[in-house]
Image (spheres, rainbow, N blue to C red):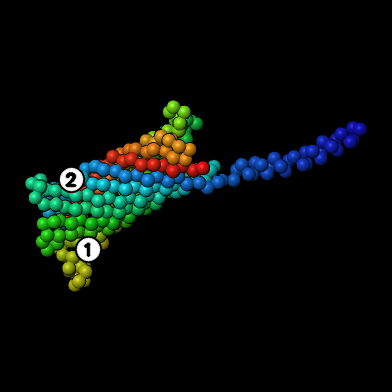
Amino acid sequence: MRHISLLCTALCLLLCHPQSAGAQRADSISTPYKQTTYMVGLGPTKVLDTYLSAEHFSGTGFSFLSTMSRHRTHRRWYTLLQHQASVGVTRDRSHDIKMLEACYRFTAARLRKWQPWQTPLILEAGGAVGTDIGALYNTLGGNNPGQVRLGLYLMPVVAAGWHTQIAGRKAGVRAEAELPLAGVMFSPNYGQSYYEIFSRGNNDHNIVPTTFVSAPNFRLQLMFNYQIAKRCALQIGYLADLRQAAVNQLKQHIYSHRCMVGVMIQPK
């Protein structure tokens, strides 16, 4: 009987051990999921472009922001993709001249998450590549009424978030900042027309390397989200996008501040 009992015990261990090991492997397999946010915003815009005018322009702008993050469970690294489009109508101080502004920006980032001391606080840091495509148009006209903006940047990204519950529903706040360190941008030279560049081929230092000194751009997001349905959360916040450059003896800045509102589509 003793031998039979030992044999049964050994068989049970052999049968149970693979199952438990398989369960552990299944638990450790990372599952992909993504989270998407769509937001619109309204707020003030300030523009200066000495290629078009020495005047300062101010007005109102509208922005659309789409954010998608791709995660895998049990992984600390994730991918963040952002699309941002904005338009603005500004006027000079005498309200006689309009400056129209439009731009599109795309950012692809790779971030790592930390959760110190097992708290609801989540810290993130990583790097990103960003593109900037835009245009300015001065309604006063003239030989050069328009200006094109093209740029490619490498930048660090840092973020911090806090997750909690309010009235039994998930809620959170997240701040994200980025500062381009280096890149390249297109710019006409001082006194150079677009006709010279594109029709006559008279290029003159039009592709300019930039750093955080010559193009000290800064972008900040501060967002609050609150769950309103099983897979949907309301998100409101503030977006500051401060773009400036001093190259080819020309100065430019476009400062936009937006109050944002939208929805966050959460994973199943």
Left/right placement of residue 9 relative to residue 81 reads right
Asked whether 259 or 257 is in front, the reply is: 259
Q: Which of marks 1 and 2 is nearer the N terminus?
A: 2
The amino acid marked with disc number 1 is His
Q: Where is residue 154 in the image (x, y as percent from the top left)?
A: 35, 52
Question: Which residue occupies 15% across, 65% down?
Answer: 193
Left/right placement of residue 196 relative to residue 75 reads left
Q: Name the residue under label 2.
A: 59
The amino acid marked with disc number 2 is Gly
Q: Residue lying farthest front? A: 229
Q: Residue lying farthest bottom? A: 200
Q: How many labels does the image show?
A: 2
State the quadrant of the N terminus. Answer: top right
Q: Which mark is residue 257?
A: none
Asked whether 82 or 213 is in front, the reply is: 82
Q: Where is residue 73 in the image (x, y as percent from the top left)?
A: 53, 43
User: Residues under labels 1 and 2: Cα distance?
Assistant: 32 Å
Q: Which mark is residue 205?
A: 1
Question: Which residue occupies 37% across, 38% down?
Answer: 235
Q: Does dot 2 land on a helix, a strand or a loop?
A: strand
Residue 89 appears in the figure: yes
Q: Residue lying farthest right? A: 1
Question: Which residue occupies 73% across, 40% down?
Answer: 17
Neighbor class of circle 1 (other Cα within 10 Å; few <14, some 14-19, many 20+) is few
Left/right placement of residue 188 relative to residue 164 reads left
Asked whether 25 or 156 is in front, the reply is: 25
Q: Residue lying farthest top? A: 167
Q: Position of residue 168 (x, y in %)?
A: 46, 28
Residue 121 appears in the figure: no
Question: Which residue occupies 23% across, 57% down?
Answer: 135
Neighbor class of circle 2 (other Cα within 10 Å; few <14, some 14-19, many 20+) is some
Which picture quadrant has residue 58? Answer: top left
